[in-house]
Amino acid sequence: MEVCASRKLGGHGGKMKRRAKIALAILVAALALVALLTATRQSAPGSGVGVAFVGYTNDAGGSRFALFEITDRERVSINLVDAMVEVEGMSATSPVFILSQARLSPKPLKSWGAKTIAIRVPWVGARWRLWIQFQRRTIPEHLRDYWMRHGRSVPVMLGRVTILGPLRYDSTNSAWLPAITSTARTPTPAY
């Protein structure tokens, strides 16, 4: 009789062990997910995204445009958020960015990809450069986009752990380009 009773206890103990293993596996998976979502970037902001001047072109109406190539050498794709022209010598009280004419595609720029954009050349008689703002498409940004596309509120906190912080934007710019003073000739950029 004692043998039979111990087998019953052993069988019940096996179910408890299995439940404990399942609970432990769920806990480990949840902790791994939180660690993945809260992980910081390993590259410095703007380090893998570049902006390079390519050349000048004209449109059918005769307006002059500067062509820039934006390259993504990051491990993740990026969203281009904004592109503006920065003019050298503007005072701190006046707006630094005077032009925002780039039509940026909403499609992300893939990792190790490049795209060319055209910016209307500013006629201000001062050196200028292109400034771009971008957002890395990391796992938290993908999850945020998924939740927002499906009309759900984005979970920000899990207890005291921040799952999704505020959107992170980085920026970079091209080298300074010389001032254009005449439409008769196109200056050669100084590198």
Image (cartoon, rainbow, N blue to C red):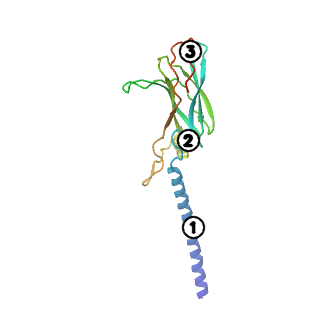
Q: Secondary structure at mark 3?
A: loop
Mark 1, residue position: 21
Amino acid under label 3?
Ser
Say whether disc 3 or disc 2 marks the residue closer to the N-terminus: 3
Name the outermost residue toward the right. Answer: 113
Front position among marks 2 and 1: 2
Amino acid under label 2?
Arg
Mark 3, residue position: 63
Q: Is residue 142 above or below residue 51?
A: below
Amino acid under label 1?
Lys
Q: Locate residue 82, reporting x and y percent.
A: 51, 30
Q: Nearer the viewer, residue 134 or 52?
A: 52
Q: Residue at x 56, y 11 (%)?
A: 184
Q: Residue at x 53, y 47 (%)?
A: 42
Q: Secondary structure at mark 2?
A: loop
Say whether disc 2 or disc 1 marks the residue closer to the N-terminus: 1
Q: Is residue 26 above or below residue 62?
A: below
Q: Is residue 38 above or below residue 61?
A: below
Whole-number angstrom distance, CA of label 2 to CA of label 1 = 35 Å
Mark 2, residue position: 137
Assess whether mark 3 and mark 1 are in contact (beta carbons under 8 angstroms). no
Q: Locate residue 39, reporting x and y percent.
A: 51, 50
Is 90 on the left or on the right of 9, as rendered? left
Q: Residues within 10 Å of mark 1 (few under 14, many from 20)?
A: few
The quarter of the image holding the N terminus is bottom right
Name the outermost residue toward the front. Answer: 190
Q: Secondary structure at mark 1?
A: helix
Q: Locate residue 187, reporting x and y percent.
A: 56, 18
Q: Quadrant of residue 104?
A: top right
Name the outermost residue toward the bottom. Answer: 1
Number of labels in the image equals 3
